[in-house]
Image (spheres, rainbow, N blue to C red):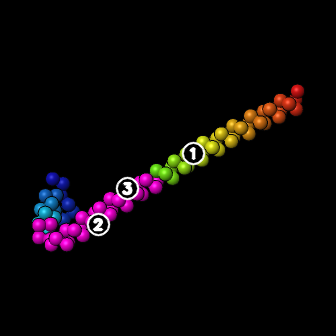
Amino acid sequence: MKPFRNGTSDITWYMLCFCWWQSASIPTRMIVIVVAAVVVVVVAAAAVVIEVVITIVVVAVVVVEVVMIIVAVEVIVVVVVVVV
């Protein structure tokens, strides 16, 4: 097992956490579970927000590309009409 900086191994920390959990009162356990659930929900919400922002940016880039193509076609048509 990979030792921590102080020389203890992973299993020692697992045992300490397990012993703490066994000795913790029910309200303390509930607080830990609620905090963990809130952290999971916040991280999931942040991931959704980031995904929405990325989607908006991609759609904006596509719109700009379409506008640039339309402008380029209009310029070509104007040049052809002026030359002819």
Real-space CA distance between mark 2 and mark 3, rounded to the nearest whole angstrom: 14 Å
Element at label 2: helix
User: Would residue 7 be found to the left or right of residue 58 on screen?
Assistant: left
Residue at 37 percent of width and 55 percent of height:
44
User: Would residue 43 be found to the left or right of residue 75 on screen?
Assistant: left
Magenta span includes 46: yes
Give the residue type at disc 1: Val
> Residue 30: which quarter of the image?
bottom left
Would you call the spot at circle 2 few (<14 residues within 10 Å), some (14-19), or many (20 or more)? few
N-terminal-most mark, 2 or 3: 2
Magenta span includes 49: yes
Q: Which residue is disc 1 drawn over?
A: 59
Residue at 24 percent of width and 64 percent of height:
33
Real-space CA distance between mark 1 and mark 3, rounded to the nearest whole angstrom: 23 Å
Residue 38 picture location, percent across and down:
32, 63
Element at label 1: helix
Q: Which residue is disc 2 drawn over?
A: 35
Q: Which mark is residue 44?
A: 3
Q: Which mark is residue 18?
A: none
Span of residues in magenta: 21-50
